Amino acid sequence: MSKKNQSFQASILIFFFYASAGTLLQFFYLLFRAKGFSIGPISFLLLIPNFFILFAGPIWASVADIFNIHKRILFIAMVFSIPSIILLSYSTTYIGTLITFSIFAINFAPLLTMTDNSVLDVLGNDKSKFGRIRLWGAVSFGLTAWVIGILADDFGIEIAYWIGAVCMVVAAISTFYLTPSTPIQQEPYWKNLQIFMGNKIWLIFLLGILLAGYGQSMLTGYFSAYLLDLGATNSLIGLSIYISTLSEIPIMLFSPFLLKRFSPQKLILISIIALVIRYLGCIQFIDFIPLIATQALHGFTSALFWISAIIYTRNLAPIKLKASALAILGAVYYGLGGVLGNLLGGQIYANFGARMMFISGAITALIGFGIFLIKKEKPNFKEI
């Protein structure tokens, strides 16, 4: 299959996977609230996907790297996540929801980074164009979130389960049309991983990633809850999500130009500055219009940050660890950072209010900014 056709198939995969994610990830708080759960138990549930990204994600990726079965692992994880999405819609008790949601999270754990890894495999050495394929995820994520917000007012928020499941089916089917990864030598995997995880440049980078993940996860996890507490409708919340994801499109579209003009490290610094500004807006405003307007910075705080982090990681990691390195990145950013952000953010929100939560997020982002300012030597990892 030609490179152009492969890029098209990768775009289909990204579009439908993020369409599924858009109907679920941004609405889990509302879905659990519709079951009658309070903010404390919901906060614990929201930790589960981050927990499994932290632990299960790297395991899935290690298997994919060791046996060079990236395409197969991606398909299996998608297929296994579908029944749990459907069963989750029927769960009425907290224990039942906890078990079913955990099953979903185990299978969802590798998908965020494995789909990105598939795109990078298609692009080969032309990694600067990653954002132009990835933008289709932003389009579908925002579009489906907006549609769900509108449909929820008439049919109930539970419709998100079914649309999410259907989109995941299409995403799984699309993996059949991706070219399998080129075979690589397998024996040195564990030795390469040991050396790579001892790389000081990588460890400093991961510390900054952790702080950024903590700051971003609180905003992602509780902004909709904040709007809801202020009296927003489901459609207004869906619109805010749509605006945030729509803001990713120009960033991803022009990411090849940005990556050629600036280093990934500089782009990460820019994204953290935008995150601090976004938090300051949430601290300052209580009206819907200016609050939702702050969502327009999401393209800088999320898309620009993630693209830059992905490219930096892929440049630093050896080819034998291509999926594992991205899984570790995701484990620290979405997993550990997400766990801390949702756990501590939920407790701060419940006990001290949203404003104090936003202040703590801004402070953490500023500390992360300082970490990324630390002078780093040029990456020079040698594979065994």
Image: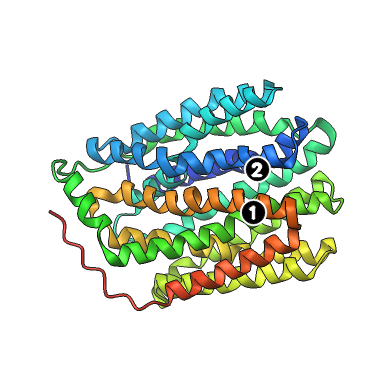
Q: Amino acid at mark 1?
A: Gly
Q: Earlier in the sequence, mark 2 or mark 1?
A: 2
Question: Between marks 2 and 1, how big is the CA–CA gap?
Answer: 9 Å
- Helix, strand or loop at label 1? It is helix
The correct choice, above or below, for 229 with respect to 99 in the image is below
Query: Is any atom of residue 12 visible in this view?
Result: no
**Residue 267 image point, x, y percent:** 47, 72
Q: Residues within 10 Å of mark 2 (few under 14, many from 20)?
A: many
Q: Is residue 66 rendered to the left or right of residue 133?
A: left
Looking at this view, name the residue that lies furthest to the front: 351
**Residue 217 image point, x, y percent:** 59, 54
Query: Is any atom of residue 191 visible in this view?
Result: yes
Q: Is residue 28 rendered to the left or right of residue 55?
A: right
Q: Quadrant of the N terminus?
A: top left
Q: Is residue 135 rendered to the left or right of residue 280?
A: left
Are the residues tagged 2 and 1 within 8 Å (C-beta)?
yes
Front-most of residues 345 and 328? 345
Front-most of residues 78 and 36? 36
**Residue 375 image point, x, y percent:** 35, 78
Q: Residue at x 44, y 53 (%)?
A: 332
Quickly name the residue at label 1.
345
- Helix, strand or loop at label 2? It is helix
Q: Amino acid at mark 2?
A: Ser
Quickly name the residue at label 2.
43
Q: Residue at x 85, y 64 (%)?
A: 287
Front-most of residues 363 and 18? 363
Q: Residue at x 48, y 66 (%)?
A: 255
